[in-house]
């Protein structure tokens, strides 16, 4: 994990044909224990969603919930004024906030800043589908922002994007244009 100049964003970077997420990838026998797949060669940018709904930290929670419902999405990257991810809000965060509001001693968050995960775990544009899947498994997340060299958001890869890619790669679904 390589920290950027922004202390709220960490960009995982790929390292050639090895996954940086394998804890023992520097062992001599690490290459022998891992079988490369097509996911090691396909860029995550090929399967990511490019039209990403984002929010700023000062957005009211109610408006964020409206965005999530309107666009039927499970998470929203929170970006700074330069378009760099600084956090993430998921539907679980929204649900936990609603449950916390039941307790009169526990005030409900009113802005995104008060309820977001204040760290954006991101992948750079050179990451592969294998990197995205490994990061999701290790960090226990379902959405990974993909960032440009300068840390600005260019897309998001979700577990559903990976599932669709796997199914289309194996010929179970057709993701091309239907005519």
Image (spheres, rainbow, N blue to C red):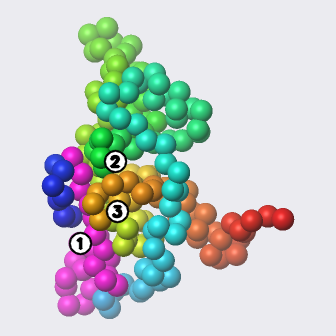
For disc 3, the neighbor class at 10 Å (few under 14, some 14 to 19, many from 20) is some
- Alpha-carbon distance for marks 1 and 3? 25 Å
Where does the N terminus fall, quadrant-wise?
A: bottom left
Q: Which mark is residue 83?
A: 2
Q: Is residue 134 visible?
A: no
Query: Regarding mark 3 in the picture, which secondary structure is present there?
Result: loop
- Residue on which the image places disc 3: 148
Q: Is residue 54 visible?
A: yes
Q: Which mark is residue 77?
A: none
Q: Is residue 17 magenta?
A: yes
Q: Earlier in the sequence, mark 3 or mark 2?
A: 2
Name the chief secondary structure element in magenta.
loop
Viewer-side residue, 3 vs 82: 82
- Give the left or right position of residue 149, taking residue 162 as reference: left
Q: How many marks?
A: 3
Rendered residue at 46%/36% (across/down)? 91
Magenta stretch: give its range.
8-30
Viewer-side residue, 74 vs 61: 61
Q: Earlier in the sequence, mark 1 or mark 3?
A: 1
Task: Please state which of the two labelled residues, at mark 1 or mark 3, is closer to the viewer.
Answer: 3
For disc 1, the neighbor class at 10 Å (few under 14, some 14 to 19, many from 20) is few
Residue 19 to residue 142: above or below: below
Q: Which mark is residue 23?
A: 1
For disc 2, the neighbor class at 10 Å (few under 14, some 14 to 19, many from 20) is some
Rendered residue at 29%/14% (across/down)? 107
- Alpha-carbon distance for marks 3 and 2? 10 Å
């Amino acid at each position: 994990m390589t920290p950027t100049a922004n202390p709220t964003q960490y960009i995982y970077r790929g390292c050639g044909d090895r996954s940086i997420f394998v804890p023992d990838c520097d062992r001599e026998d690490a290459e022998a224990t891992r079988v490369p797949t097509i996911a090691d060669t396909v860029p995550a940018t090929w399967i990511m969603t490019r039209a990403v709904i984002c929010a700023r930290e000062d957005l009211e929670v109610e408006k964020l919930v409206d965005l999530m419902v309107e666009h039927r999405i499970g998470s929203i990257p929170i970006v700074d004024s330069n378009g760099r991810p600084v956090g993430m809000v998921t539907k679980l965060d929204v649900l936990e906030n609603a449950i916390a509001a039941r307790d009169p001693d526990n005030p409900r968050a009113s802005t995104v800043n008060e309820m977001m995960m204040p760290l954006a775990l991101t992948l750079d544009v050179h990451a592969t589908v294998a990197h995205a899947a490994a990061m999701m498994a290790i960090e226990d997340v379902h959405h990974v922002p993909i960032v440009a060299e300068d840390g600005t958001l260019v897309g998001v890869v979700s577990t559903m994007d990976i599932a669709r890619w796997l199914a289309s790669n194996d010929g179970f679904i057709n993701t091309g244009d239907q005519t």
